[in-house]
């Protein structure tokens, strides 16, 4: 069945793989990122937008979604990791930068959709295990994913006609993981929690973006079995 989906963070990693798979299925795909989504064919509507620049989000959505009144699934996927650093050593300004993309940009997007009478059947917010189980050194990211999870729970209460979940994708071999593997950036001595991500590479714990995207798109209808606003870990399904 033909579907219309909206995917944030479509230039790389999971967002690009979701876009690619949705296009292969013949769906209409709307998406945004700073770099853009190049080299894919099909009914792709792509706009470049920096989600950290909040004043630019509404004009971008107005342009891209001008004639769109129904979206089967919104994937709030764009995210940044921020610095791996002890929270006490992380300035509020650095945390705010992560929050701006991982939390507040998503609020602006959802508010625009709901205030402009775009009917959204489902929203899948790409979350992380750190939303409920933070790691030392992952302060800004953990705080942002924890708050994002709560934001999704609150929107589920405000908009009962849309189904919401926060979905943990498991480990996905993307730029985010490459950053964590880079010893010149993150020292395992200082932050031992990164070792498990390094060890996971080459094992079935570290999935490819393509495999995870395919699984997520298959699972979307089944996610409706959960109470709207639920926090769901794909590895437990
Ligand atoms: N990889 C994992 O193991 C893992 C595990 C759990 C959760 N996640 C979550 O999965 C999601 C996707 O991450 P990924 O692993 O695929 O990493 P990625 O390859 O780094 O992709 C991140 C995406 O977010 C976009 N983005 C970041 N900052 C943005 C900004 N200011 N404005 C617009 N777009 C922005 C990037 O596009 P531009 O740079 O072009 O703007 C890119 O398309 C994130 O929410 C992440 O927290 C990942």
Image (cartoon, grey):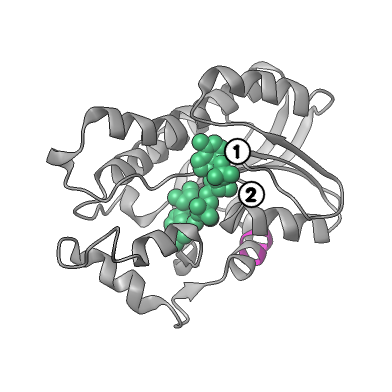
Along the horizontal axis of the image, is 145 left or right of 45? left
Question: In the image, residue 135 lies at what x, y percent?
Answer: 23, 55
**In contact (CB < 8 Å): disc 1 and disc 2:** yes
Question: In the image, residue 27 lies at what x, y percent?
Answer: 83, 51
- Label 2 neighbour load within 10 Å: few <14, some 14-19, many 20+: many
Q: Residue furthest front?
A: 184
Q: CA distance from mark 1 to mark 2?
A: 8 Å
Residue drawn at point x = 30 percent, y = 72 percent: 196
Q: Residue furthest bottom?
A: 203
Along the horizontal axis of the image, is 111 left or right of 192? right
Question: In the image, residue 90 lies at what x, y percent?
Answer: 20, 38
Q: Say which element carries label 2.
A: loop
Along the horizontal axis of the image, is 176 left or right of 131? right
Residue drawn at point x = 27 percent, y = 60 percent: 186
Give the dominant element type of the magenta stretch: helix, strand or loop: helix
Snapshot quadrant of residue 6: top right
Most foreground residue, 2 or 172? 172
Residue 11: which numbered mark, if any?
A: 2
Quarter containing the N terminus = bottom right
Magenta span = 214-218
Residue 34: which numbered mark, if any?
A: 1
Q: Is residue 234 magenta?
A: no
Question: In the image, residue 175 lies at what x, y percent?
Answer: 49, 59
- Looking at the picture, does residue 85 appear above or below residue 96? below
Instruction: Confirm or reject: label 1 Cβ below 8 Å from ligand 1.
Output: yes
Along the horizontal axis of the image, is 26 left or right of 11? right
Most foreground residue, 115 or 80? 80
Snapshot quadrant of residue 164: top right
The answer, for residue 164, to whether it is visible in the render is no
- Label 1 neighbour load within 10 Å: few <14, some 14-19, many 20+: some
Residue drawn at point x = 52 percent, y = 21 percent: 54
């Amino acid at each position: 069945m033909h579907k219309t989906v909206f995917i944030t963070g479509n230039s790389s990693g999971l967002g690009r793989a979701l876009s690619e798979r949705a296009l292969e299925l013949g769906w209409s795909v709307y998406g945004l990122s700073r770099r853009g989504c190049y080299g894919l064919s099909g009914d792709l509507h792509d706009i470049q937008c920096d989600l950290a620049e909040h004043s630019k989000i509404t004009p971008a959505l107005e342009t891209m979604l001008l004639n769109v009144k129904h979206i089967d699934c919104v994937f709030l996927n764009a995210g940044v990791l921020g610095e791996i650093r002890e929270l006490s050593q992380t300035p509020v300004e650095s945390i705010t930068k992560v929050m701006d993309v991982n939390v507040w940009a998503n609020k602006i997007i959802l508010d625009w959709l709901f205030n402009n009478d775009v009917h959204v059947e489902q929203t899948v917010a790409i979350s992380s295990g750190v939303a409920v189980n933070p790691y030392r050194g992952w302060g800004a990211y953990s705080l942002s994913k924890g708050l994002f999870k709560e934001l999704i729970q609150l929107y589920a209460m405000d908009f009962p006609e849309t189904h919401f979940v926060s979905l943990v994708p498991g480990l996905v071999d993307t730029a985010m993981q490459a950053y964590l593997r880079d010893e010149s950036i993150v020292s395992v001595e200082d932050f031992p929690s990164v070792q498990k991500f390094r060890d996971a590479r080459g094992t079935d714990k570290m999935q490819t973006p393509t495999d995870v995207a395919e699984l997520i798109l298959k699972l979307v209808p089944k996610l409706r079995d959960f109470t709207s606003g639920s926090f769901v870990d794909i590895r437990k399904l």
